[in-house]
Image: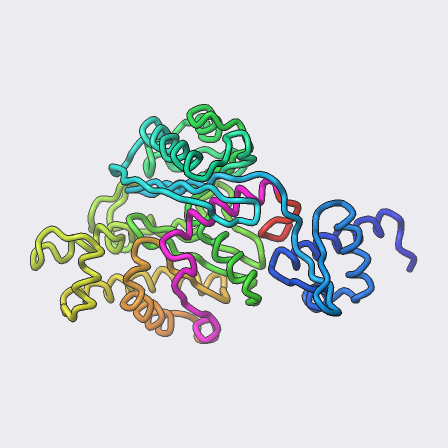
Amino acid sequence: MIARPGDQAALHRANLARVLEAIAAGEAHQAAISRHTGLSRATVSTLVAELEAAGQVETTRSGRRTLVRLARRPGFVLGVDHGHRHVSVAIADLDREILAHSQTALADHSAADVVLPQVRVLLDDLLALTGVGRNEILAAAIGLPTPIERGRGTVASPSILPGWAGRDIAGFAAQTLDLPVRWVVDNDANFGARAEYRAHSAAGAVVDSLIYIKFGAGLGAGMVLDGRLMSGINGTAGEIGHSVFDDEGPLCRCGNRGCLETLVAAPAVARQVVETHGEISIAEVVALADGGDPGCRRTLADAGRQMGRAVAVLANLVNPDLVVVGGEMEQAADYVLPAIRETLGRECVPVAAASVRVERARHGRLTQLVGAVTAAVDEVSPVSTFRA
């Protein structure tokens, strides 16, 4: 069968995209790009030459090899991670390298009118520190601890983050920060999944499906399935923190009782040892556990086992290669991760349990912020983190 001109053009565009994806994933020379894409070396050479002529890649010679990288482009991006009790801000270049970042504490349930002026202060400080001009910021992204309506960028569940409900978040952020650029608004766990998926891809790992667990003051899951970020029809995919685990449990911010967040989020874990240790932070709980305190060790392991039950449900449903745990509770990984693995082994379909890996986030507590930077770069990049 002879391919029609339209089919040939579509195939050519797809091959260009595959080569760009391979380069973005860290493949540095044409032989590696050929192996990554399955295209012949001659085809890769032709496509790389076309991309170089278009200014999208740069090539250099190293011995007999031609090394390829995405072209350095002028400009910077802003990433914002708004948690329940903090907001973090970063400025990065278009290679996703963070130049500087800063954070400030927040009261729980802080409204947009409170948070965004604080982001403005942090941004102004970072611009002065880095020497980046406001007009050099090309795109920005903000992650929020609540489901975000797909395609609209608005809060999908007002009871979880009421102070942001009904807002045109991108528009309000652009106005408050004096930053009229392209904005990405998404759930913070989705940004975490974005960061970890890219980190594993850049390291050469083959990961088709990944679940990122944001385990902190709030709980959530970002899911990448077959190379695509899944948000659901209303943005609530992965909202494990508001799955009910105890009908008679504590009242949750969402209006239900016994949501997973009320049982194992960082503040709930710290409250469980108040009777024996007084008012205490989760960092202090971890420090005491590290020192051998049996009550703190048991409390952290119990939280991991309970979280493991939720992860087991997700793993049975979507059968991921990898589960990554980040957020504030990542500091308790030595106690939480073994308990999650144990529960997966007990409650998962055996073949799914045998094939999934459970790891701590590569970016640690900065994971959602790195994901926001990645999302902002994707807005102005010739190649996206995810498959089209």
Q: Is residue 366 left or right of residue 16?
A: left
- Main secondary structure type of the part rendered in magenta: helix
- Identify the residue at image location x=41%, y=34%: 123
- Identify the residue at image location x=47%, y=65%: 322
Relative depth, front residue between 382 and 251: 382
Q: Position of residue 358 (x, y in %)?
A: 41, 67
Q: Position of residue 224 (x, y in %)?
A: 52, 56
Please state the extent of the stretch shown in magenta in the rendering.
Answer: 351-380
Any magenta on residue 379? Answer: yes
Q: In the rendered view, how is the structure colored?
A: rainbow
Q: How many labels sit on residues? A: 0
Position above or below: 301 against 381: below
Q: The N terminus is located in which quarter?
A: bottom right
Query: Is residue 238 in view?
Result: yes
Any magenta on residue 44? Answer: no
- Identify the residue at image location x=14%, y=66%: 295
Q: Is residue 340 left or right of residue 45?
A: left
- Identify the residue at image location x=18%, y=54%: 270
Q: Position of residue 337 (x, y in %)?
A: 33, 67
Relative depth, front residue between 255 and 93: 93
